[in-house]
Image: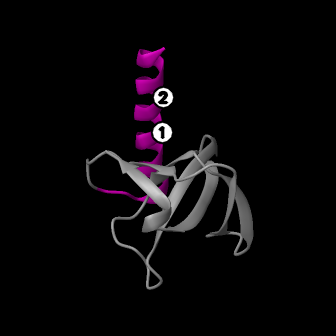
Amino acid sequence: MIFQQKVLNDLFNATCRVVMGIADKKPLNLAIIKGEGWAHYMSHYDKRIIPIKKGSSWYVLNEEPNEKGQFKLFWPSKLFFGQVILVPEEDFDLIQ
């Protein structure tokens, strides 16, 4: 199971690098949304507030926060597709 998960993570990282133009070779960091229940964050592409399950894991797409102090977090739903949300740093734990 762990081997399969590592292979899938490697495939996902490679896909993100190709699709989103991430040039460096550093792996993407994983973020866990803090707390239990539901939170609401702005969808980067849809430009609307969407519900997000707390405790879910997301990949951090950018190293620097935007002007509001929010990071772009990505959750893959299908190959080459997924959801990107804007989340303040204090709302997630970073796993490297």
Residue type at mark 2 is: Leu
- The residue that mark 1 highlights is 12
Task: Assess whether residue 61 is covered by the magenta stretch.
Answer: no
Q: Position of residue 62 (x, y in %)?
A: 39, 64
Give the Cα distance between marks 1 and 2.
Answer: 6 Å
**Residue depicted at x 43% and y 78%:** 69
Residue 54 is left or right of residue 46, and the answer is left
Is 55 rendered above or below residue 22? above
Q: How many marks?
A: 2
Is 19 rendered above or below residue 8? below
User: Marks 2 and 1: in contact by CB < 8 Å?
Assistant: yes
Residue type at mark 1 is: Phe
Viewer-side residue, 65 vs 81: 65
For residue 96, the mark is none
**Residue depicted at x 69% and y 50%:** 37
Name, please, the residue furthest toward the left: 25
Main SS, magenta region, reads: helix
Residue 47 is left or right of residue 71, and the answer is right
Under circle 2, the secondary element is helix
- The residue that mark 2 highlights is 8
Q: Position of residue 16 (x, y in %)?
A: 46, 49
- Give residue 76's quadrant in the image: top right
Under circle 1, the secondary element is helix
Task: Assess whether residue 13 is covered by the magenta stretch.
Answer: yes
**Residue depicted at x 43% and y 59%:** 61
Residues shaded magenta? 1-23
Instruction: State the quadrant of the C terminus.
Output: top left
